[in-house]
Image (tube, grey):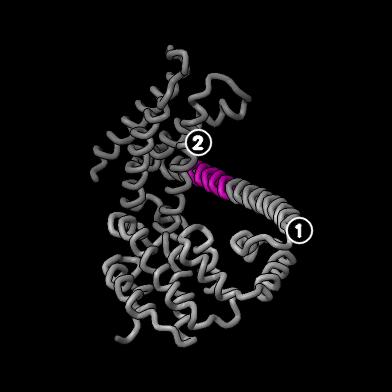
């Protein structure tokens, strides 16, 4: 870019900065100058390109590090100029805020001095030193902003962790009270949900109680055939809680797979772009099926339609390959 082009960028940056400084004096509606900060973007862009042109023309080559140092200085100055413009939007405030609002004018003037080499070598060196100080200030603001952001995120993470612990403790206490309030003859469908309790003691007691359930396979078969929420809890228990599933469960579980396929088909076909989020809900079907087949049950006719559906859906093809069984 020619010297004239860089001068035009500096003039436009100066004009934009003057307008920014005048914005606090203008009249706005009851909500104030909503979006007025956008007027700071053009002068910031003009200043950036002007300073980039000065850098490319080698005006900072005499500084140790040459253009690399100049590039670092360019970034810091852009940050500092943005901070100065934000300060200029305030019509009042402490002395330091008013001083910061004047800094963009100093930076634009120093850039012009360095570009033209006014005031001989001494003036250019002094202007470069002032630009360097402005750059250090800008980088300081960036580091401070990053540290503040990290501190806020750390506080938010700690707060979320504390909330999660509080919720877990509350759920744990509620599960303990509900589990111990159940009558001895409570149906299996009411006991099964506690296998996933956040309270480890309740979880152990629940699994032990189910393991000693009279005719457990028969009860699981009845739940699988009912097709209610109890069927889903039974499937989850077979998938992970049951020590040794029996092949006796295969016919009822096959019917459960068929009903599940019809229940999921529409959602999976029409929501295939985000169907992968449902994988955790689908996994119990196939973990339980795998365990029943390992015990000697044959669920291949029921798994084949699942495979044909899932293999068409991006994000679930790996699951389809996992459940595929030799015909």
Is 246 located above or below residue 107 in the figure?
below
Which residue corresponds to the image point at 33% horizontal and 59% vertical from the top-left?
268
Q: Are marks 1 and 2 in contact (CB under 8 Å)?
A: no
Horizontal and vertical percent position of residue 304:
31, 76
Is 256 located above or below residue 267 in the figure?
below
- Dot 1 falls on a residue whose secondary structure is helix
Q: Which residues are magenta?
A: 130-146
Q: Is residue 143 magenta?
A: yes
- Kindly tell me whether residue 158 is visible in this rendering: no
Horizontal and vertical percent position of residue 151:
64, 49
Q: Mark 2 — residue? A: 83
First-in-chain label (1 vs 2): 2
Main secondary structure found in the magenta portion: helix
Q: Quadrant of the N terminus?
A: top left
- Dot 2 falls on a residue whose secondary structure is helix
Is 126 located above or below residue 324 in the figure?
above
Which marked residue is nearer to the observer: mark 1 or mark 2?
Answer: 1
Which residue corresponds to the image point at 48% horizontal and 81% vertical from the top-left?
292
Q: Nearer the viewer, residue 231 or 77?
A: 231
Which disc number belongs to residue 180?
A: 1
- Dividing the picture into quarters, in which one does residue 207 lie? bottom right
- Left or right: residue 8 versus residue 247 is left
Q: CA distance from mark 1 to mark 2?
A: 62 Å
Which residue corresponds to the image point at 34% horizontal and 33% vertical from the top-left?
42
Mark 2, other Cα within 10 Å: few <14 / some 14–19 / many ≥20 = some
């Amino acid at each position: 870019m020619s010297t004239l082009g860089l001068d035009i960028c500096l003039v436009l940056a100066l004009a934009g900065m003057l307008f920014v400084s005048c914005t606090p004096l203008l009249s706005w509606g009851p909500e104030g100058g909503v979006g007025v900060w956008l007027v700071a973007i053009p002068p910031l862009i003009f200043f950036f390109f002007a300073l980039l042109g000065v850098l490319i023309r080698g005006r900072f080559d005499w500084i140790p590090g040459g253009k690399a140092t100049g590039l670092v200085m360019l970034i810091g100055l852009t940050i500092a100029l943005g901070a100065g413009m934000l300060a200029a939007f305030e019509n009042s405030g402490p002395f330091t805020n008013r001083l910061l609002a004047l800094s963009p004018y100093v930076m634009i003037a120093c850039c012009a001095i360095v570009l033209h080499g006014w005031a001989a070598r001494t003036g250019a060196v002094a202007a470069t030193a002032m630009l360097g100080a402005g750059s250090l200030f800008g980088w300081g603001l960036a580091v401070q902003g990053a540290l503040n952001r990290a501190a806020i995120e750390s506080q938010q993470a700690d707060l979320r962790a504390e909330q999660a612990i509080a919720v877990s403790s509350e759920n744990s206490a509620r599960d303990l009270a509900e589990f111990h309030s159940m009558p001895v003859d409570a149906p299996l469908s009411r006991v099964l949900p506690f296998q996933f309790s956040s309270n480890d003691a309740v979880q152990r007691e629940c699994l032990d109680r189910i393991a000693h359930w009279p005719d457990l396979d028969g009860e699981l078969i009845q739940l699988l055939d009912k097709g209610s929420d109890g069927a889903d809890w039974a499937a989850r228990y077979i998938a992970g809680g049951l020590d040794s599933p029996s092949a006796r469960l295969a016919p009822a579980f096959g019917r459960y797979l068929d009903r599940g396929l019809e229940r999921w088909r529409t959602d999976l076909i029409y929501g295939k772009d985000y169907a992968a989020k449902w994988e955790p809900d689908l996994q119990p079907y196939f973990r339980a099926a795998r365990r029943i087949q390992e015990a000697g049950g044959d669920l291949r006719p029921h798994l084949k339609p699942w495979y044909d559906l899932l293999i068409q859906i991006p994000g679930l093809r790996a699951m389809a390959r996992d459940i595929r069984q030799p015909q």
